[in-house]
Image: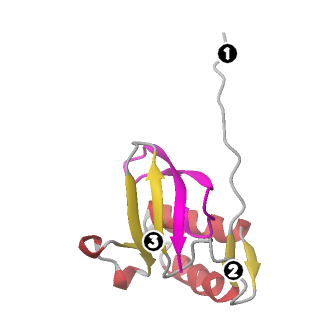
């Protein structure tokens, strides 16, 4: 008997031109130090719909957004998506250069995505609310 593997399609993401440029540069500069996350972020930027600055819909996660999402473990979390130097888990600020941060960028409210944690486990999250 064959095992059936179900894969969920990857949702379309939207990023501003400014976020695209800065995140692509950040990921490229991080390839040697953080290869897995850097490659994941570059993959996200490759598939993103890039729009003019100021044209990203209000319900889409961008840099500086406060996002509430539900994890596959049933927990709901709220974080602000920030650049690495601003990260502070105590203050609920998560870096885009983490696996979950790279997964969140460009998602809209209601969208879900699978992502791989640093320990190799697969997870899924669903964006519930975005505040910009």
Tell me the residue at 32%/71% (across/down).
92
Q: Secondary structure at mark 1?
A: loop
Task: Determine if residue 33 is in view.
Answer: no
Which mark identifies residue 2?
Answer: 1
* Depth check, front residue: 14 or 47: 14
Magenta stretch: give its range.
Answer: 103-132
If you read the primary sequence from the N terminus, does the residue marked by circle 1 or circle 2 appear first? 1
Seen in the picture, residue 76 relative to 49 is either above or below; the reply is above
Seen in the picture, residue 123 relative to 44 is either above or below; the reply is above
Q: Secondary structure at mark 2?
A: loop
Q: Where residue 9 sits: x, y (%)?
A: 71, 47
Location of mark 2 (residue): 56
If you read the primary sequence from the N terminus, does the residue marked by circle 2 or circle 3 appear first? 2
Q: Secondary structure at mark 3?
A: loop
Tell me the residue at 64%/29% (across/down).
5
* Depth check, front residue: 39 or 109: 109
Q: Sort mark 2 into few (<14), some (14-19) or many (20+) by Cα contacts within 10 Å.
A: some
User: Closer to the camera: disc 2 or disc 3?
Assistant: 2
Q: Where residue 20 sits: x, y (%)?
A: 65, 81
Q: Give the spatial CA distance, label 1 vs label 2.
A: 43 Å
Q: Is residue 46 magenta?
A: no
User: Closer to the camera: disc 1 or disc 2?
Assistant: 2
Query: Is 90 placed left or right of 69 in the picture?
Result: left
Seen in the picture, residue 86 relative to 2 is either above or below; the reply is below
Q: Where residue 116 sits: x, y (%)?
A: 48, 50
Location of mark 3 (residue): 97
Which residue appears farthest toward the top when viewing the image?
Answer: 1
């Amino acid at each position: 008997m064959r095992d059936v593997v179900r894969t969920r399609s990857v949702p379309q993401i939207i990023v501003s031109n400014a976020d695209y440029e800065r995140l692509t540069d950040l990921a490229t500069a991080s390839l040697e130090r953080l290869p897995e996350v850097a490659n994941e972020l570059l993959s996200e930027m490759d598939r993103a719909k890039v729009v003019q600055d100021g044209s990203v819909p209000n319900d889409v996660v961008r840099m500086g957004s406060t996002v509430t999402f539900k994890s596959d473990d049933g927990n709901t979390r709220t974080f602000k998506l920030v650049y690495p130097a601003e990260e502070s888990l105590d203050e609920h600020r998560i870096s885009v250069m983490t696996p979950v941060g790279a997964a969140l960028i460009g998602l809209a409210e209601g969208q879900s995505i699978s992502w791989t944690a640093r320990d190799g486990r697969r997870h899924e999250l669903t964006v519930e609310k975005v505040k910009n």
